[in-house]
Image (spheres, grey):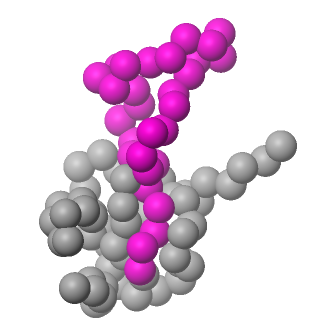
């Protein structure tokens, strides 16, 4: 099944195995991590390309299960920012 977003919506998937460390190198437990969610774009009805990593608010999405995978549907306007790896 393919999910297609409508009406300025974006479908995202959680980033698996995200390692969260403090500046001192301490790995944080999931319950202690920041409240924003790092996700990857699956499909967007607007301006984001699939695979783009973005930041969304913690509870401002609809959770959907499809083919054994978890997806979140968010308003494109609710995407807080794009995550870029800068070396």
The image quadrant where one finds the C terminus is top right
Q: Does the magenta stretch include residue 5?
A: no
Q: Residue at x 56, y 22 (%)?
A: 21
Give the residue at the far front of this rendering. 68
Is any atom of residue 59 visible in this view? yes
Q: Residue at x 46, y 86 (%)?
A: 46
Q: Residue at x 47, y 61 (%)?
A: 40
The image quadrant where one finds the N terminus is bottom left
Q: In x, y percent, where is residue 70?
A: 24, 60
Vertical placement of residue 80 versus 87, above or below: below
Read off the magenta span: 15-43
Q: In x, y percent, where is residue 56?
A: 40, 54
Is any atom of residue 62 visible in this view? no
- Marks counted in the figure total 0
- Left or right: 67 in relation to 25: left
Q: In x, y percent, where is residue 19?
A: 51, 31
């Amino acid at each position: 099944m393919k999910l297609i977003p409508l009406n300025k919506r974006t479908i995202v998937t959680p980033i698996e195995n995200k390692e969260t460390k403090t500046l001192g190198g301490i790995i944080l437990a999931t319950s202690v991590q920041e409240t924003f969610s790092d996700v990857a774009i699956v499909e967007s009805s607007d301006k984001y390309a699939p695979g783009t990593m973005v930041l969304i608010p913690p509870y401002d999405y609809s959770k959907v299960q499809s083919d054994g995978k978890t997806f979140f549907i968010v308003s494109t306007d609710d995407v807080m920012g794009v995550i870029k790896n800068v070396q």
